[in-house]
Image: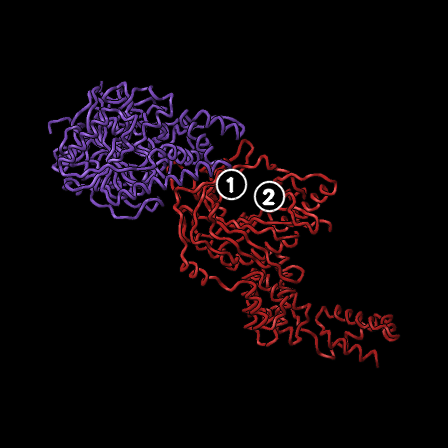
Chain colours: A red, B purple
Amino acid sequence: MSKYEAVIGLEVHLHLSTKTKAFCGCSTEFGKEANSQTCPVCLGLPGSLPVFNGTALDYAIKVALALNCKVQEYTKFDRKNYFYPDLPKGYQISQYDLPLSLDGFLNIETEGSLKRIGITRVHMEEDAGKLVHENDGSLVDFNRAGVPLLEIVSQPDINSPEEAYQYLSTLKSIIEYLDVSDCDMEKGSLRCDANISLRPLGESKLGVKTELKNMNSFKGVKDALSYEIKRQAQLLESGEILTQETRLWDAKELKTISMRTKEGAKDYRYFPEPDLPPFIITDAKIEEIRKSIPELPHEKASRFVESYGLLEYDAKILVASKKDALFAEECFNAYPGKDKKLIVNWFIGPLMAEANNRNLSISGLNISSAYLIELLGFLSRNEISNLTAKSVLSDMIDTAEAPGKIIKSKNLVQISDGQALKEIMEEVIGENQKSVTDYKSGKENALMFLVGQLMRKSQGKANPKIARELLKERLNA
Amino acid sequence: MNKNLYSLTAHELAVGLNKKEIKSEDIYSALDGRIKESDPKVNAYLRPSKGLSSGGDRITSGIPVAIKDNICTKGFHTQCCSKILEGFIPPYDATVIKRIKESGHSCLELKTNMDEFAFGSSTENSSQGPTHNPWDLNCVPGGSSGGSAAAVASDEAIWALGSDTGGSIRQPASFCGVVGLKPTYGRVSRFGLIAFASSLDQIGPITKDVYDNALLLNIISGYDPNDSTSINLPVPDYTRALGKDVKGLKVGVPKEYFIEGLDPEVKAAVEEAINTLRKMGVEFKEVSLRHTEYAVPVYYIIATAEASSNLARFDGVQYGFRSKDANLIDMYKKTRGEGFGEEAKRRIILGTFALSHGYYDAYYLRALKVRTLIKEDFDILFKELDCILTPTSPTAAFKIGEKVKDPLKMYLSDIYTISANLAGIPGISLPCGLTKNGLPIGLQILAPHFQEEKIFSLAYAYEQNTDWHKLKPKLT
């Protein structure tokens, strides 16, 4: 693969989480009974006319600004004409030659440094309905028809599947901070198509590109791109000439399948939407929306480093999710100690592990900052071991009870009392004579084994530090 | 009231209603009888056999308005006289229908005939058969609002709504000897008007005289939040413009409108009208609208381009006619192939071509630029003029079948009306004479944007000094 450079551009479609649709008053709520959220406008009934939703415009401008785009003063809608049963008007209201905004960028983390990915344009459009296939035919659900969409088109600045993944994660994180979309790929509120071509390293001319569709997760995007890089490289190696085409990602078979070639490309016959006059976006409006943009992830990360003494690496992980970051900051402020390292380690360690196991976010675990601080208090006072603390955390999540109560009821307080530990220690020594001999003959590792045995015998309650000191003292005597 | 109620104007009937000498039901039953008697000859209405008395929850109030078949009426058929919309019953009322009901009036349940999707100038392109001109049943009533114009002319309706994209109110009004107004673009809500060309379409009144026209415009005008192209300007009481002194009004007569192709009888009638108005103190001036010759080609690019997109929704999926076929693409092809008439197909193909990749710049974009020039021609003239006066159509009504095989000839029938749609300005047609053969001739008055009052003042002054609007056709 090192012979070729991949050139990748991504097109992201994002549902805006406005209460009502882009051009009518119907609700955008997901998961309702089919066609229950429709009216003559979003059904495209004869004679109906669109009226643009001002909130959708505000959200769109917000995203454009957060992605450093230049919001255009004069913008308009266009019709994109094509036939499909889920498209009630036979055209989609979209934007063509005068989009909402142009020329932005997004910084992504790649191999420890920042890389700037250009954003060509962010424009507004409407979603189509959804086909439901049944045995004896297909049905259309128009609940989704007319939901406001943003199309975010990147420059072909992405050079690897990993960078594509980073781009999507960073974008999602920013959008979540703006609170304008739930970015849920499973619900279809975030969709991504990719354009990819290969060229020999050092070559500046672009190769023949493939458009990839039908990926339904960030990992799917990454996998499809990896597959496509291999496929195209093999073809190029064997001297074949690639054709420009659209390919679909098959997530089961883990491969891409050709859908249509350029010859079959559609002519969408774009022209200005005569039902919606062009409009002006004033500087005052742009400034007003700019002021409403909250602290974005990279800004929050810098502040965490400055205010709480976090490592940059840790801070970046913490801010990826807005809700988790808010929860973390609540904990920092509630924690009495100046050093927040313990909290950070617990967020990135046990909390994240619990969240992943349960398929939730950290904030979704629903534990209060007070309980978490209480738990970490037991730990830092050496009243419980790290191992015990993790199991208490798990119980806290399951039962929503206070850590103190759990520790007390399960009798989990760490044994730091020398006399009690000595009794267990003698048993361990008696049962592990070989290790004792090993240690005495200079094998330091044997001591760790004995500490481990002691911990096991105490059911994790022994204070490992004191146990180690006691063992060392006893064996060296 | 000893006359037949159906032969009266709305303002005459309003007097009777106000004095409680008549009831709305009386007007309904008079019209019902008249339609039964006359519509078999005229064919102004769809499904006239249904009559007016059917339907349990019929609301009879005020003076009923006849509605063109491309304006959505909740609960009863609206199909643009196209097979493809067969059986379509809108679940909502167009804004104009709501306004008529809110004003205390009502709508006839029979819809008026038209060229399919308003594509035509003769009401021959209708899935319901042609409408006949009440002045000569062998002639067309004009189009596309031929049903509305013929209904008003034959006293089958008191007043009516039409729609005008390139002359579809004014030209049939001219052919049928009635008064038809295309308001300023944005004056009347298009919500519920099944679109032909969205940037050109306007709904307007077709009436027996100028007074009724102003009354009906009062009712249907005004800003509608459901139509983003409607303009939020106050609506004056247009009847207050009637009877205003026209002395000193400056009116232009564009020389480009008096050229080859203009019937000498029409020319003479318009010149006579100019003389009549001049005697009343109106000042006339020959002017030039330099880009007039481009109006027809520009119109047929823009209008068909928009139409090709507006008609894409008629795909057999949700409503109307669907040709049975298992395969989606074949279903689309057969539904549209069988559902649309000849002229609709012609315009869809023209418009699709004009918007196609590689042709867009040369056709559509260029047409938009010339449209701006045409609009500027008017803007410049209206700096010094109150109105512009022209013939409505180069000829009086032609014979049924005469132009139907020659679309270009048919398109030229709108040569004097199209510019107003391209410029977005208001225009009226009112009767100003009869040909030797007894066919009506129409006079067109154009005014600047939102200056319908000027049109009404001038039209009313002319009407009060002539008797053309009082003539009734013989229905032979």
Of residues B177 and A249, which is closer to you in this image?
Answer: B177
**Label 2: chain letter:** A
The quarter holding residue B149 reads: top left
Quadrant position of the C terminus of chain A in the picture: bottom right
Residue B427 percent across, percent down from the top left: 26, 37
Pointers 1 and 2 within a single chain: yes
Q: Residue at x 52, y 34 (%)?
A: A138
Side of B331 relative to B187 (left or right): right
The quarter holding residue B350 reads: top left
Residue A217 percent across, percent down from the top left: 60, 49
Asked if the residue at tag 2 contacts the one at tag 1, i.e. Cβ–Cβ closer than 8 Å, the answer is no
Residue marked by disc 2: A213
Residue marked by disc 1: A130
> Which three-letter amino acid code belongs to the residue tagged 2?
Lys
Side of B97 relative to A307 (left or right): left
- The label shown at residue A196 is none
Q: Residue at x 34, y 39 (%)?
A: B374
Q: Which residue is situated farthest in the bottom direction here?
A: A477
Point out the tag, 1 or 2, that comes first from the N-terminus.
Answer: 1
Q: Secondary structure at mark 1?
A: strand
In the image, is residue B46 above or below residue B464?
above
> Which three-letter amino acid code belongs to the residue tagged 1?
Lys
Q: Secondary structure at mark 2?
A: strand
Crowding at mark 1 (Cα within 10 Å: few <14, some 14-19, many 20+): some
